[in-house]
Each structure stands twice: as C-alpha cells, then as structure tokens.
Image (spheres, grey):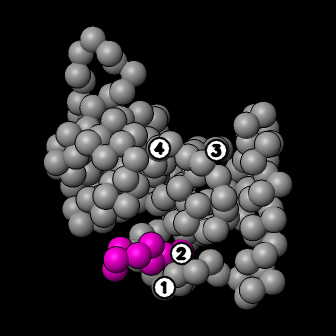
Amino acid sequence: MDFRAILSALASGGVRFVVVGGVAAVLQGVSVHTYDVDVVHARDPENRRRLIEVLRKLEAHYRQHRTKRLVPKEEDLGLPGHHLLMTRFGPLDLLGSVKDKRTYEDLIERSPITDIGRGLRVNVLDLSVIIEMKEALGRDKDRAQLPEYRRTLEERSKLGGDAPGQSHEPS
C-alpha cells in the first residue's frame, strides 16, 4: 500500500477529507500495522464531484465484489455509509461518518493539518479523538491497540503536544 500516493491524489484533487484510523495513528507516531487508508470525506455535492474524479484516476472499485468491477457513483458518496475500495495504490476506505455518526464537519476541528512529507499536508484526526472512538467501539482489535495509542499520546504530551509536522492552522 502506498498511502502517500492515495492521500496525495485526494489532496491534489481538492478533495476535503480527514485521515482517520490506522494511518492517522501512524502519522502521529503510533507503531501499528495498517492495511488501508481510512478517510472521512465532506459529502457536499462539489466535494463529491472532485472525489469521483480522483477515484477515476486512482482506478477505484469496490473490493468486496469479486465477479464484477463496480465503481463508486457520485450520488452514493453523499450517504453516511462506508465505501471499501481498492485503488491502484492499495485499499481506501471512504467513510461518510464514523462513531456516533460524526461527519467531516464534526471532525475537522479536531484534525490539525499535518505535513506528512514531500510537501504533502492533510488533515489528520487527533490521536486523543482516535483513542476516544476506539474505547467507545470496544472491539477486541481496538482494545488490543489502545495501550500503544495511549503510550504514544503520553509521549507526545511530554514533548509538547503536537505530533511532528502538525499545526492547528485552518485548512
């Protein structure tokens, strides 16, 4: 998986999104393995149009359909559900909302802009919010990861708060 290529395509295409999940944790120093990029996207019509164009360039299709190559439709991206896609750079999970139906608009204030290298700057959900969401989900895999997430958050706090590359400027 080349998560930078996926995020770069989204950012270059002018898509408004927040990185959540494992990649968001990794970008903040957590040492976990993740196999997909999870993003919550703004669902307004203009953002959906930009997103569909980027998905075409990424050759995105639903990964759970093995017999047909189904591609996402713009109108489907307006719904709060999940779109589990495969792109030419690896898996991408487009999420209309996350825990407690939190949307892009709900998450953006807690998602500082983060420089993830090579001049790429994206909004990444704050690690403390990721921890809150994992605690609320209560799944076994989330409980197993929480000690590492908390340890990383504690270390970041000792070092002054922000993860490397993060700023709290508006996007």
Q: Can residue 49 be seen in this view?
A: no
| Amino acid tagged 1 | Glu
N-terminal-most mark, 4 or 3: 4
Q: Does residue 30 appear left or right of residue 75 in this picture?
A: right
Q: Do the residues labelled 3 and 2 touch (CB within 8 Å)?
A: no
Residue at which label 4 appears? 36
Determine the image quadrant of residue 85. top left
Q: Which disc number belongs to residue 99?
A: 3
Kindly report the secondary structure that dominates the magenta region of the rendered protein. Answer: loop
Crowdedness of circle 1 by 10 Å Cα count: few (<14), some, many (20+)? few
Q: Nearer the viewer, mark 4 or mark 3?
A: 4
Q: Are marks 4 and 3 in contact (CB under 8 Å)?
A: no
N-terminal-most mark, 4 or 2: 4
Residue at which label 2 appears? 112
Between the residue at mark 4 and the residue at mark 2, the CA separation in whole angstroms equals: 21 Å
Q: Is mark 1 on a helix, strand or loop?
A: loop
Total marks in image = 4
Q: Does the magenta stretch include residue 13?
A: no
**Residue at screen point 81% across, 72% down:** 154
Between the residue at mark 1 and the residue at mark 4, the CA separation in whole angstroms equals: 27 Å
Q: Is residue 71 above or below residue 114?
A: above
Q: Which of marks 3 and 2 is in front?
A: 2
Work out whether residue 103 or residue 135 is closer to the camera in this orientation and state it: 135
Q: What element carries label 2?
A: loop
| Amino acid tagged 3 | Lys
Residue at which label 1 appears? 169
Q: Where is residue 68 in the image (x, y as percent from the top left)?
A: 24, 15
N-terminal-most mark, 2 or 1: 2
**Residue at screen point 22% across, 62% down:** 13
N-terminal-most mark, 1 or 4: 4
Q: Does residue 122 appear left or right of residue 138 in this picture?
A: left
Give the magenta part as a residue range: 112-120
